[in-house]
Image (cartoon, rainbow, N blue to C red):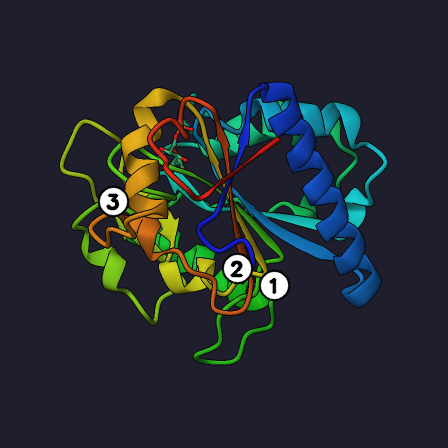
Amino acid sequence: MENFRRVTVFDDKKLLVAHIIDTWRKICAKCIAEQGYMTVALSGGRTPIEAYRALARNAQDLPWKKIHIFFVDERFVSLTHQDSNYAMIRETLLDALSMPNKNIHPVDTNVPEPDVAAQRYEEEMIRHFRLLPGEKPRFDLVVLGLGEDGHTASLFPGDQVLCETERLAMAVLLDTTLHDRITLAIPVINNARHVIFLVEGARKAVALRKVVEEQDMALPASLIEPIDGDLLFLADRDAAGLLSGSISAQ
Ligand code: 6PG
């Protein structure tokens, strides 16, 4: 794949955001022309907030009624909780768009256990994508972030969910003060047509180098390798500060 493990670096956040919107537009146009709809999985975290707000402001003309939104991961909290990815994405993006509710596919966290939420989310993907047993959904676009420890989605270093090959979504029980999570499994992300990592800040520089240039498999983000799709890293200058040769500038 042409962009495999290559990073496009931006000096200006506005350019980075404009690039995401442009990429979203191109993927959307192709998806609508070829299949009549586009299905996207979005991440939480702070990095994509500005891009979501800009999409809400500048991409009202997209055929949102034909776009379906899923969530890369979710915290096991109510969907109105301040730490909910759904709440953040609704507030920054979805509330501004004229999208039917049926196009938005949150992780239902109003259940007793994270594992039940993961099971329900899996059932929602099976229903939406009309999957036969053993099939994986094919998202048209998956937007990912990168943690300082190399996590992406809610796939953390050393967690057993990294080895999952059958399930589509998994509960992630965190032995910390953080909330438990529900995450898409790696084979689902790797089945996408387009995967875009958004990476900002010097704090992420070591992880980005390990993922892009060393392919250090101890970092979950290194396990993201679309089998029949493309992978794009969009980074700011600080996050790309330790890269030696795999960058192109914008
Ligand atoms: C989440 C994410 C997670 C995130 C990274 C980066 O819900 O938090 O899906 O994987 O993308 O932790 O987070 P920041 O963008 O806040 O640095």
Towards the viewer: 24 or 245: 245
Type of residue at label 2?
Answer: Glu
Answer few, some or many: residues within 10 Å of disc 1's Cα (few below 14, many 20 plus, some between 14 and 19). some
Type of residue at label 3?
Answer: Phe
Q: Secondary structure at mark 3?
A: loop
User: What is the CA distance from the residue labelled 2 to the residue labelled 1?
Assistant: 6 Å
Taking 39 as reference, is 109 above or below it? above
Taking 85 as reference, is 186 above or below it? below
Residue occupied by mark 1 = 128
The x and y percentages for residue 42 are 53, 42
The x and y percentages for residue 223 are 33, 57
Closer to the observer: label 3 or label 2? 3
Residue occupied by mark 3 = 156
* Residue occupying image coordinates x 43% and y 57%: 120
Labels 2 and 1 touching (C-beta < 8 A): yes
Question: Where residue 124 is drawn, which disc sits there?
Answer: 2
Labels 1 and 3 touching (C-beta < 8 A): no
Towards the viewer: 217 or 53: 217
Q: Is residue 223 left or right of residue 92?
A: left
